[in-house]
Image: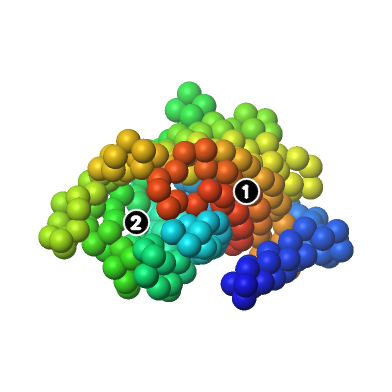
Amino acid sequence: MTERRTTCGLLALWLALAMSPGFGSSLAFAQEQHEASTSDLAKAAQNPIADMISVPFQNNFNFHVGPHEQLQDVLNIQPVIPITLDRDWNLITRLITPVISQPPLTVTGEREFGLGDINPSFFFSPKQPTHGIIWGIGPTFVFPTGTDKTLTQGKYSIGPAFVALTIQGPWVVGVLVNNVWSFAGKSNRGPVNQMLLQPFVNYNLPGGWYLTSSPIITADWEAGDGDRWTVPVGGGFGRVFKIDKQAINAQLAAYYNVARPTGGADWQLRAQVQLLFPK
């Protein structure tokens, strides 16, 4: 019960700050000439390989996890830092660090809290779009940094990652995909062969507002047919604004898992605050 009250309190605070008209009117939306417009900034925030430093804090509230159907809370801290290689290419670095509150995964288990497995990715991306397509490709890694056996796969994994998107008028549409295979780690843990597929569709509105859908679809190729897929369906909304000179992208979305493994969440609520540092 305390857990649910805390979750509701955090969401209420987040919504009150980010979405209230009084708050929005005090954010000084008027942009100086040397700064990107709100619309351009929103589209850049929706581009996973934009030539812009950003620091997203993405909190995923996963409901009805495990045999006791409790809340799992995953905070992903995922800074994105672009590096200029030459006049034609950038290297976009992305590091996902999960902080997890894990409910019991067995009937007699206990809740655990700690660090999960970190996931760095590197995308080589041309500075100019190719026939209107912005894209990047490179390696992704998973390191077994989890602080408890329930928070880690116990394996070192590697694989390819690819992202492609197009920006047409108010639309930002694309997909991010990767697949990792384990190559080392604890011998008492099973092999890893997992895919992540994240299509994203954003429609931008006046005043920095936008509609969004970016479900994270996963497949565990080592699992049985009934436990292989997690397929969310849903969406939400967001807003790009400024507090003083700090650009911020705030987003709230909900997803229902039409396919999920045994013990997996049936619903997810995703709240994100992303700090933006345009050039």
Please state which of residues 120 and 103 is positioned toward the viewer in this rendering: 103
Q: Residue at x 31, y 49 (%)?
A: 140
Instruction: Name the spot of residue 31 as percent of width and height, x first.
Output: 76, 55
Q: Residue at x 31, y 63 (%)?
A: 152
- Pointer 2: what residue? 120
Which residue is outermost to the front?
107
Q: Is residue 79 above or below residue 177?
A: below
The answer to whether residue 10 is left or right of residue 126 is right
The kind of residue on which mark 1 rests is Ala
Q: Residue at x 15, y 61 (%)?
A: 188
- Pointer 1: what residue? 254
Q: Which secondary structure lies at badge 1?
A: strand
Q: Is residue 12 above or below residue 156?
A: below
Please state which of residues 7 and 32 is positioned toward the viewer in this rendering: 7
Residues packed near mark 1 inside 10 Å, few (<14), some (14 to 19) or many (20 plus):
some
Which residue is outermost to the left?
187
Q: Residue at x 39, y 54 (%)?
A: 93
Q: Quadrant of residue 218?
A: top left
Instruction: Name the spot of residue 158 as percent of width and height, x first.
Output: 24, 49
